[in-house]
Image: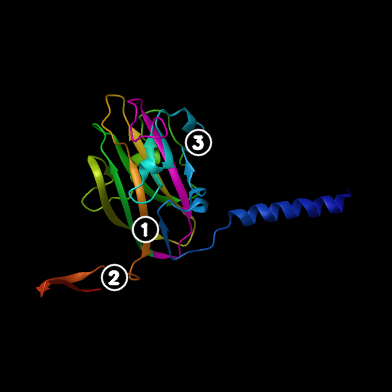
Amino acid sequence: MNKITLKIAILIVVLMFSALHLQAQVIGYQCSFEDETERLLWFLNEGDQGDLCANKWHIGKSGAKDGDYGLFISDDGLSNNYQNKGVSVVAYRTLNLLPGNYDIIIEWKGVGVNNDGLYVCWMPDSIVTNSVNSDVLQKFVKDGTYNVSFKFAGSRLCGQSTWAKSADLIYSDGTPYKLVFVWNNGVVSTAPPAACIDNIYIMQVGKCQNPKSLNLSFQDGEVSFVWEG
């Protein structure tokens, strides 16, 4: 192979590699973890210490509210149980949303003890978000700059043994961002279930109006709901 042919081959490889990492901008995102292709786009237990963590992220039945798949923390890969060995373990998915404000809604559950809990961050893809094999929260979580603070629930989700739905607003500047889930637990004791997440919705504000002025009526054995939006 001569030098010119070698250079062309290298260029083709570089272009192919770049194309694989380019993401088309989208106007929203929906994930129930049922689609295999979508599951492969999630990075679980990211970083060198991720595999060392006693409690890790998995995708399977134990994390599902509906269907067969959901995202969940487990010490055995099967149950929602976790060990009282400190971790701050990360799962994330990179998205490239069109510029604008978005509603984010997730369905989740998770109990925990003391400071155990689930944190959700929305942050530039360029920021490193590795797992830590200790109960010390990463700086990007502790600073709070990128934390999603859900209405009525706050930035630390915990104390919920049954499925709940939480919502908040996030903003996209049109560059790749990542949706980051961090499960943090200490070393005192455990209170399962650990974090479970299913049915993630990200919708541009104004594209789907929230219902308002809900009216309920009964007539001839039928129930009618009327609303605006």
Name the quadrant containing residue 208: bottom left
Residue at 61% across, 54% down: 20
User: Distance between the Cα atoms at labels 1 and 2?
Assistant: 14 Å
In the picture, the disc for residue 47 is 3
Q: Is residue 89 magenta?
A: yes
**In terms of secondary structure, where does tag 2 sit?**
loop
Q: Residue at x 41, y 30 (%)?
A: 76
| Structural distance between the alpha carbons of marks 3 and 1 | 26 Å
Residue 170, how many percent across, how many down? 35, 58
Q: Secondary structure at mark 3?
A: loop
Q: Earlier in the sequence, mark 3 or mark 1?
A: 3
Looking at the rendering, in which quadrant would you find the C terminus?
bottom left
Residue at position x 25%, y 40% from top? 158
Q: Is residue 14 above or below residue 83?
A: below
- Residue at numbered disc 2: 209
Do the numbered discs 2 and 3 sit on residues whose CB atoms are within 8 Å?
A: no
Where residue 2 sits: x, y (%)? 89, 49
Q: Nearer the viewer, mark 3 or mark 1?
A: 1
Magenta span: predominant SS is loop
- Foreground pick, 117 / 56: 56
Nearer-N-terminus badge (1/2)? 1
Residue designated by label 1: 201
Farthest-out residue, right:
2
| Total labels drawn | 3
Q: Label 1 crowding class (10 Å Cα cut-off): few <14, some 14-19, many 20+?
A: some
Mark 2 vs mark 3: give the one in front. 2
Q: CA distance from mark 2 to mark 3?
A: 39 Å
| Magenta span of residues | 75-100
Q: Is residue 9 above or below residue 43?
A: below
